Amino acid sequence: MNIITNKKNALLFISIITGHFLFAQIDKNATKETKALCKNLKTISKEHILFGHQHALEYGHGWSNKPNTSDVRSVTGSHPAVVGIDFSEFSGHFKEEIENAKIILKQNVIDTYERGGITTVSWHFINPVSGKSFYKKDSTAVAAMSFIKEGGSHHEQYKEILKTIADFAHSVKAKNGTLAPMIFRPYHEFDGDWFWWGKPYTSKEDFIAVWQFTVSYLRDVLEVHNFIYAFSPDNKFNSETEYLERYPGDNYVDMFGIDDYGDFGRDGNYNLEAGIHKLKIISDIGIKKKKLAAFTETGLESIPNSTWWTETLLKALKTEKLELAYVLVWRNDVTSPTHFYAPFPGQVSAPDFIKFYNDPYTLFENDLKNIYNNKFKL
């Protein structure tokens, strides 16, 4: 289906190709492909939503390191449109381990880009002060954000870590020489208490200072121009004011996200009304500020609800006139029999997931054509 299906979409397409599409991207020097991706994601969000899965191509339920394989593809015939990776291995490890991690992820990102899919990056950042886990419970440095901000004792170390990320961003070149765009989502779920950068351990001022420095240093000093920057707390807000309490400003964010497992069935608790209300908040902010919005993480572990995909997730996404670029569910562990968030062949929700896949509202990788240029089609 060509995206120009009616007068409304024709006008959207015209505005894209003439350069008048109202999208406030923060990097004026972004690559042509990154700019096109932003605009096309904004267009998609008006009528559809992309489906994403974390670590989809690195491993899955009972397997790892199989070329061109994903559990989602095994069920539907298509990879997810959005593939999640993580920069967790880019610090806190020996140099050789970091380089090996970069090699694996580099190929993952390039392959996804060349197939026409999209990469989003989370960052389970090992505490640079304690050298331990990204989890607060494993960390001895409570206020680490105050150490890595400008003027802090670990600021130079933080700059070196950002250089590692920049080197990776500059390395993901396709065969045609273009750089693969990535949606970079640092310091996610910052309103919770489980990560060392969480709200109980980090002042609003320090959080904003570190976020602004991170974007400015990558974009303006290290010249990373293939990132789209996503801001995504957990679900601990009930109003726009609460959501934006730690917002670093319009010059430092391209995408508004939310991670919400709690309202969508975690521990058997469903509160779809609350979940929809929060999705509407971020959708409305994106519309108002001319930026993107996305459901950056969700899912139901083990998916015991056989109709969760259509009767919970899809129903929630369709209840309001939401403008969300994508929805991403969490990973499928290799060895755990219960830690998975996307179905695999034989899993109880797989038939319902095929219905979810076939719904015209949802888009997978096979549905995307030319997402990185102005000839975009569905």
Image (spheres, grey):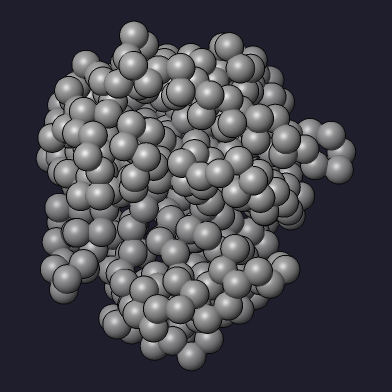
Number of marks: 0
**Could you say where residue 278 lies in the image, as x and y percent from the top left?**
21, 45
- Front residue of 219/372: it is 219
Which residue is nearer to you in this view: 236 or 208?
A: 208
Q: With respect to residue 271, does 132 lie above or below? A: above
Q: Can the viewer see residue 322 in this picture?
A: no
Residue depicted at x 44% and y 24%: 158
Query: Which image quadrant is residue 206 in?
Result: top left
Q: Which residue reaches farthest bottom?
A: 346
> Is residue 153 visible in the rendered structure shown here?
yes
Q: Quadrant of the N terminus?
A: bottom right
Q: Residue at x 32, y 14 (%)?
A: 152
Give me the residue at 47% from left, 30% from top. 229
**Residue in front for this viewpoint, 150 or 141:** 141
Q: Quadrant of residue 72?
A: bottom right
Direction top: furthest residue: 151
Image coordinates for residue 333, horizontal then vertical, percent:
45, 71
Q: Nearer the viewer, residue 13 or 214?
A: 214
Determine which quarter of the picture holds residue 57.
bottom right
On screen, residue 304 above or below 57 = below
Q: In this view, does 138 lie above or below 290?
A: below
Q: Residue 268's spot in the image, x, y percent?
A: 16, 73
